[in-house]
Image (tube, rainbow, N blue to C red):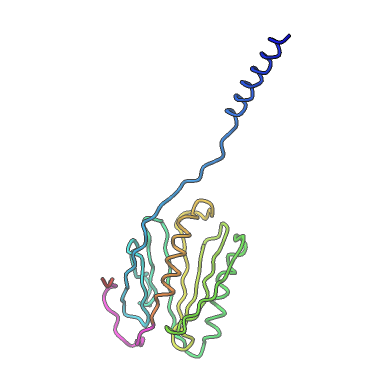
Amino acid sequence: MKYSLILIIISSFFVSCGDDAAQPKPKAFLALEYPTPIYKKVEFPCSYSFEINEIANLKSPKIKNPCWVNIDYPLLDGTIFITYQPVNNNLKELLMDAQKLPLEHTVKADEIEGDTYINKKKRSFGTFYEVYGDAASQAQFYLTDSVNHFLTGSIYFKSKPNFDSIVPAANYLKNDIKHLMESVTWENWSPQHQPKDSLSVKE
């Protein structure tokens, strides 16, 4: 009887270990690492300038407005689209339009958060929006000096929106947008100035 009891205990131990080994392991998420950002100032024929990540390419979209630019990230398969408009007694309308943009993603978004940005020294005021969920754009912003200049920007990825799969890339670009907002300076420029032939990066 004693030996039978020992055999039962030993058998139970091995069965228990076998059950643990058969347990499915939780899914592991792909850990994507991107290079530490190094920022450089960009110069082009407009009334504002800012800094971009050196892994990005500054491109001019195929439109007549030389002050609309695309910041392309080949490594992340994403782009930050930048638009600029001069303020001409229409600041209220520009603000309303910029604040409506994040609302266009409410159908797909799980949550939208807005953070106010104020830099009195550089005379820059705006809002940075983070969009959570399978929305087309994961972040947007607007920035203005409240007198002459109005800037907006949005992140878009070339792949179909899937929040879980683009989280690392989206977070990386969100940090770049925040740096862009902090680095913006407003320049003396008028639309009558002849635009340069190409964009350039200042070392």
- The secondary structure making up most of the magenta span is loop
Q: Is residue 49 above or below residue 75?
A: below
Residue 190 position in % (x across, y down): 35, 88
The residue range painted magenta reads: 186-200
Q: Quadrant of residue 50?
A: bottom left
Furthest residue to the bottom?
89
- Taking the spot 53% from the left edge, 52% from the top edge, the residue there is 164
Relative side of 121 to 57, left or right: right
Q: In this view, does 196 lie above or below 52?
A: below
Residue occupying the point 52% across, 61% down: 136
| 188 horizontally vs 100: left or right | left
Q: Picture coordinates of residue 191 (x, y %)?
A: 36, 86
| Left or right of residue 182, residue 189 in this image | left
| Residue 49 percent location from the top left of the image | 36, 77
The quadrant holding residue 109 is: bottom right
Q: Of residues 82 and 171, which is closer to you in this image?
A: 171
Q: Quadrant of residue 23?
A: top right
In this rendered view, identify the residue nearer to me: 87 or 51. 51
The outermost residue toward the right is: 1
